Image (cartoon, grey):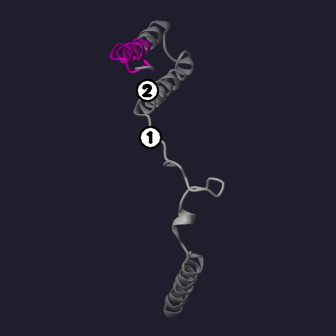
Amino acid sequence: MMMIFSMMLLTMMIGLLLMALASTISKKTFSDREKNSPFECGFEPKSSARMPFSLHFFLIAVIFLIFDVEITLLLPIIIIMKNCSMIHLSIISLTFITILLGGLYHEWSQGALNWSK
């Protein structure tokens, strides 16, 4: 038992030593304003390198993802066709598509899909 404990301790010490050695070797010691600024052919930057983020674009991307996931939820209906009757399949499909179209109409009426404001 003592031999297993000593081997575990030795392994942990070697691992910690290697991690400490790797972290000290990989550290950059020289950092200045020139290296941290964006590169523009050797000239000083004329304006900020970061452009303002369009919140409207982000909202449209989120709406796209939500509707994309909902459309992928429609795909298992093909597999369900084997196991349930046609009336149940029609009710489930129409309910889901109605909810999807209701969400689309809501987004359209709120103006979230209008790109130019």
**What amino acid is found at the position of numbered circle 1 in the picture?**
Pro
SS for callout 1: loop
Q: Could you tell me which residue is drawn at 58 percent across and 79 percent down?
A: 22
| Nearer the observer, 76 or 15 | 15
- Please state the horizontal and vertical placement of residue 59, each as a whole percent of the image: 41, 30
SS for callout 2: helix
- Label for residue 52? 1
Number of other residues with Cα within 10 Å of mark 2, as a class: few under 14, some 14 to 19, many 20 or more = some
Number of other residues with Cα within 10 Å of mark 1, as a class: few under 14, some 14 to 19, many 20 or more = few
Identify whether 38 is placed above or below 53. Answer: below
Magenta part of the chain = 97-115
- Please state the horizontal and vertical placement of residue 17, each as a whole percent of the image: 55, 85
**What amino acid is found at the position of numbered circle 2 in the picture?**
Ile
Identify whether 40 is placed above or below 13. Answer: above
When asked about the image quadrant of residue 18, the answer is: bottom right
Residue 26 part of the magenta segment: no
Identify whether 86 is placed above or below 40. Answer: above
| Nearer the observer, 116 or 58 | 116
Identify whether 77 is placed above or below 19. Answer: above
Q: Could you tell me which residue is drawn at 40 percent across and 11 percent down?
A: 98
Residue 103 part of the magenta segment: yes
Q: Determine contact: label 1, label 2, CB under 8 Å.
A: no
Indicate the quadrant containing the C terminus: top left, top right, bottom left or bottom right: top left
| Nearer the observer, 5 or 55 | 55
**Disc 2: which residue:** 63
- Please state the horizontal and vertical placement of residue 14, each as a whole percent of the image: 57, 86
